[in-house]
Amino acid sequence: MKLISFSRNGAKSFGAQTHQGVIDIGARLNLTDLGAALRQAGIDAIKELGDKSHADFALAEIDAYRPVVADPDKILCAGLNYDEHVQETKKQRTERPTIFMRVAASQVAHEQPIVLPLESDRLDYEGEIAVVIGKAGRRISENKAYEHIAGFACYNDGSIRDYQLHTSQWGPGKNFESTGAFGPTLVTADEIGENEVLTLETRLNGQVMQHATTEMLIFSIPTLIAYCSSFVTLAPGDVIVTGTPGGVGAKRNPPVFMKSGDVVEVEVSKLGVLRNPIRGESA
């Protein structure tokens, strides 16, 4: 099942995207956000409503997409999780995953602008795969990790590189408003095989900049879930962003940073295409 978050006629909601149109699950649950629905009703109830209901309107009738989970309690991001990216940054592999955090306010949706802020001209793309938690857990074992996944989505961990490198802490460069894109859909875990290999590609103005598969992850998705749940309880609606492959703009010769008017796309097999124009922030 494909789940989307959207606005329509001035109201926010979420639902299932089908060949017939959109099933407004939010209206049926009297909830506006997918994260809240995952926490209160659960992924099984959401899927059941999607399976037994008819479409309420055409996809073309939504006003805009929203970040597919607009209200996560936590966004945990893995850094340096592909060897090619480790090498281009001249870093060393670590024994444990490198984890940093994003705030929900830094996210935008499919087709919404990623904003180049006034403070910088070093806006970089990072195509990634996001995992959304469907079942709460602490100290989750790797062999049980997939039982805790609600679904998967495309993510662009847009980064303001000069702010990211101000100190050894990456947080500022990863949390500028409207820089992290998330969507367009959440593909539920039952649509993706537990050992299925997904292919990730990032394109800037149509040119392929990154290409990798999940076989190339240093720390697998189950490993990331197990590690993150070792220090925090993962809640339904939480997001784990699994890392970007090599080919980022900052490490090219010469560097390639995104500018106003550019279009960036992140495509993941079976998950779709996340597309965002770049817009310079107005003074």
Image (cartoon, helix red, strand yellow):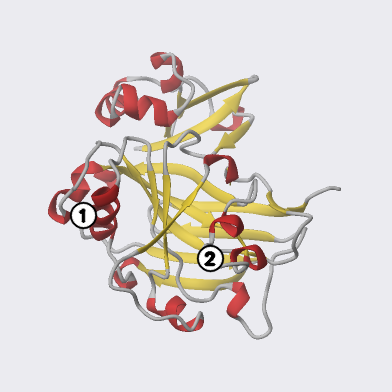
**Label 2: few (<14), some or many (≥20) within 10 Å?**
many
Tag of residue 230? none
In this view of the protein, which residue sits in the foreground, 73 or 9? 73
Tag of residue 194? 1
Which image quadrant for residue 190?
top left
- Residue at the spot of label 2: 202
Local secondary structure at mark 2: strand
In this view of the protein, which residue sits in the foreground, 64 or 156? 156
Residue 77 percent across, percent down from the top left: 43, 55
Which image quadrant for residue 31?
top left
Residue 172 vertical position relative to residue 41 in the rendered view, above or below: below
Residue sitting farthest toward the right: 283
**Label 1: few (<14), some or many (≥20) within 10 Å?**
few
Please name the amino acid that badge 2 sits on.
Thr
Residue 197 percent across, percent down from the top left: 29, 64
- Residue 15 in sight: no
Q: Earlier in the sequence, mark 1 or mark 2?
A: 1
